[in-house]
Image: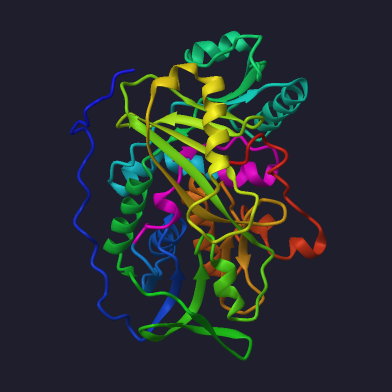
Amino acid sequence: MTPRTPGADLPEHPDRLWSAAEPKASYDVVIVGAGGHGLATAYYLAKNHGITNVAVLERGWLAGGNMARNTTIIRSNYLWDESAGIYEHALKLWEDLEEELDYPLLFSQRGVLNLAHSLQDVRDSKRRVEANKLNGVDAEWLDPKQVKEVCPIVDISPDVRYPVLGATFQPRAGIAKHDHVAWGFARAAAALGVEFIEHCEVTGLRVTGGRVTGVDTPRGTIAAGRVALCAAGHTSVVAATAGIGLPLQSHPLQALVSELLEPVHPTVVMSNAVHVYVSQAHKGELVMGAGIDAANSYRQRGAFHIIERQMAAALELFPVFARAHVLRTWGGVVDVSPDASPIVGLAPVEGLYLNCGWGTGGFKATPGVGWCFAHTIAHGEPHPLNAPFSLDRFVTGALVDEHGAAAVAH
């Protein structure tokens, strides 16, 4: 594989969005976290509901958290009805989002393969394909030869440690450029009047008479009619300042990219058994992700043995990658709920709304959850698609345990 010189095929970043030097005294809605979900929520609040007196507060810089550290995969082939509903809604929005935002998101529907390496993998995968079809989600079962036709560089030899016995395939799935997605939503929201205030950490929630009234920041208290928490990996920390304990654990999640290479990998390949997923970005980097570190942590770096196993697994599936060089590795902090599915809806404090617990599945849901979360905030009640992901399911036991059901949960 020949290293490739970066081309001029990608647009330059737009001029930096204006950030208020000082926030206003009050807003109708304050969104905590200027990542993908916070930006999408702000955009749909303005576009769909006419709520434009909105401030998005970010302790760092716009889209500098997990949105800058994800592996760009978009799919909706989840097993359970609740997950399929919100992710398929998101995928349908993805398909028209570049035109709507008038910004090149580099959305590429190159398909996603989920490999099966054992008889149980095959049974579970075929079950998921049939469940997808019942929910109107495109899904196919491929035998090893068909897997090779979709992705010629996958090793389907029968004598390897993890033989490929087949795979599910979602043709409409794919990837998008994560920073372009953030800028697309931010530009569109800013044009509708939304403000973005960077380097403005929320240090506490103000609650009076059981209702949220504002947020504390190093720049002073900002009054708010409603507050929405979208701070991936840290929502539980902010919620705790209002006396709310969330059933979340935070873990590092690692990934890496290679040097720039000529196009060699035409789709996205994921494997639960060896827990690695691989795609090739538009510029040419191989993008590889792994599972979360087992230990709880807020560090944006993880254990070396996780990356080591990830690379070993990738080379099992793609021997051609043996000559590629790692360009950089990184880690993000994800929050994970007990059933590894998100929490999206009303908090126990009136006027406070939660969007957290996505684990590794947050990026692909970006437009869908932004749409539904904006509806929830505007109407004070959940949208039907996010209603199953309410906080009280941990009291009733109505869990959405997608992590163990739909191959790898990314």
- In depth, the one of 374 and 241 nearer the eye is 241
| Residue drawn at x 36%, y 86% as measured from the top left | 25
| Residue drawn at x 57%, y 41% as measured from the top left | 306
- In depth, the one of 6 and 398 nearer the eye is 6
Tell me: residue 277, above or below residue 161: below
Tell me: residue 50, above or below residue 172: below
Asked whether, in this view, residue 97 is left or right of residue 247, the answer is left
Q: Give the percent coordinates (x, y) of residue 279.
A: 45, 30
Quadrant for residue 353, please give it.
bottom right
For residue 86: magenta?
yes
For residue 269: magenta?
no
Q: What is the quadrant of the C terminus in the image?
A: top right
Asked whether, in this view, residue 289 is left or right of residue 102, the answer is right
| Residue drawn at x 65%, y 62% as measured from the top left | 248
Is residue 317 visible in the rendered image? The answer is: yes
Task: Farthest residue to the right: give it.
Answer: 396
Quadrant for residue 238, please give it.
bottom right
| Residue drawn at x 43%, y 41% as measured from the top left | 94
- In depth, the one of 336 and 39 nearer the eye is 336
Q: Give the percent coordinates (x, y) of residue 187.
A: 28, 57
Query: Which residues make up the magenta segment?
Result: 62-88
